[in-house]
Amino acid sequence: MMDISLIIVSITGFSLLVLLLTFSLFIVKIYSSKSIRDPSYPPVKGTVFHQLFYFNRLYDYQTEVAKKQPTFRLLGPAQSEIYTTDARNIEHILKTNFDKYSKGEYNQDIVKDLFGQGIFAVDGEKWKQQRKLASFEFSTRVLRDFSCAVFRRNASKMVKAVSEFAIPGRVLDMQDILMRCTLDSIFKVGFGVDLNCLDGSSMEGAKFMKVFDESNALIYWRYVDPFWKLKRLLNVGCEASLKKNIKVIDDFVHKLISTKRNLLSMQEYCNEKEDILSRFLVASQKGPERMDDKYLRDIILNFMIAGKDTSANTLSWFFYLLCKNPLIQEKIAQEVRDVTGNQEEETNIDDFVANITDETLEKMHYLHSALTETLRLYPAVPVDGRCAETDDILPDGYRLRKGDGVYYMAYPMGRMPYIWGEDAEEYRPERWLKDGVFQPESPFKFIAFHAGPRICLGKDFAYRQMKILSMALLRFFRFKLADDTKTVTYRTMFTLHMAGGLHLHTISRKN
């Protein structure tokens, strides 16, 4: 027994020693060759472990640091991670020196299991190919008209679904219903499929939405988990969960591609060029070796995160802010009535949305400003960035080395007094208006839609969908928070997802 105890103690001690030595080497690697005290490099505000420590409130932690130091860095084992809120730096990396910055192997390695070779994860020829094709498709009148028809139809469905909660005492999870609505929209516009998540008839679609959101969060966790590769190798913990989720996602998407390809080959799908997937499938026939089903799968999932998460998340924060600012909520509702010429309380929802035209949307300056103000404070993508392909000097004078990551912080930027004034943290749509007309800002100051050559192609589509849904909902309902005392915050992931949902009371405007 003594011999066995001695062996166990020895093995345990040896294991602890190996762990201590490994950790020590890891720390030495983090701090070595990083020019920590060199003032020509951004000041060090910690290591990548700080992100793990502050993970649940990461963007607020970054805001606190950025208020004191607009450009700073965290040290990692292989490179430094530079964070900035300086618009000059952002223009430099996203436009002026565009070719000197890429997604980088570090970022691509983290996201490729979910996003593969899709447009948000690649550089070079693959990015140019997808960008060129997507840019052409987004510019067509056919797609614009088709998407507007889908948005109006789903807005009508949304109002009918929400009306079931317009009963005293009932509580609506607005984020959940918005997620289901925008998922239906992106599947119809993007892939020509009626998913029917909004009415709850698609269990397969609901499962897909759940595992996709979970996978988004699990992939983002890799940025702060130094052992994620080991976990993936051993297939344990969060990496095992991610692997199962991605299997569900892959099966769902490949079935979608196969079904669509069969419909096209049999020529039973008359409007084959209405939805985006059909257009990519037609393009793939010209070069099937370059655009196989795996590549199409990656393209689809990248459109998914762009089309579902961004609009639904923004609208969730929008309705949260309207509940916090009821006067602004009523001001938008009045603009809806004024612009549509619809002052009567008894109005049919189908007739109302059918009359929302492009001309109507262009007149909604206050609504457009309120949505933009929401994106300023709660950007759909709170942090994004690039990787330096060569040594460089940023416009604020700080140096960075080849391989360093450079991240622009959209969430902190919206809260910086040195960018937006002393009322930066106040929700004030009027800051975007001049004589009642919306006035845009520089995309390097208002970075919610990215900027430069990779600026978001779906910006106009996103605004169109958000405005149609907002107009329909605010025309027929008032909204109040179910619990004013509850703190509403975010989940730390690629998109600014509201943690725990948005629980509201719904009041019909007919009452």
Image (cartoon, rainbow, N blue to C red):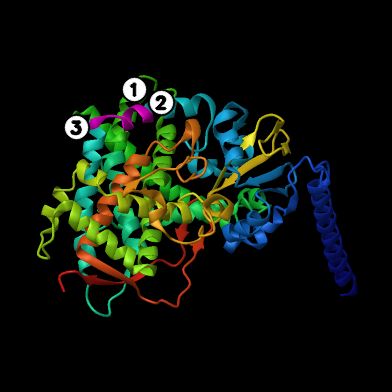
Dots 1 and 2: beta carbons under 8 Å?
no
Residue under the point 26% across and 34% down: 143
Residue under the point 45% across and 43% down: 441
135 and 91: which is toward the camera: 91
Provide the residue span drawn in magenta.
134-141
Left of 393 or right of it: where is 357? left
Residue position for label 1: 285
Q: Position of residue 34 (x, y in %)?
A: 80, 43
Magenta: main secondary structure equals: helix
Residue under the point 36% across and 55% down: 370
Q: CA distance from mark 2 to mark 3?
A: 22 Å
Asked if residue 138 is among those painted magenta in the image, a careful observer would answer: yes
Q: CA distance from mark 1 to mark 2?
A: 17 Å
Viewer-nearest of discs 1 and 2 = 2
Identity of the residue furthest to the bottom in this view: 169
Residue position for label 3: 271
The first of marks 2 and 3 along the sequence is 2
Residue under the point 22% across and 41% down: 358
The first of marks 1 and 2 along the sequence is 2
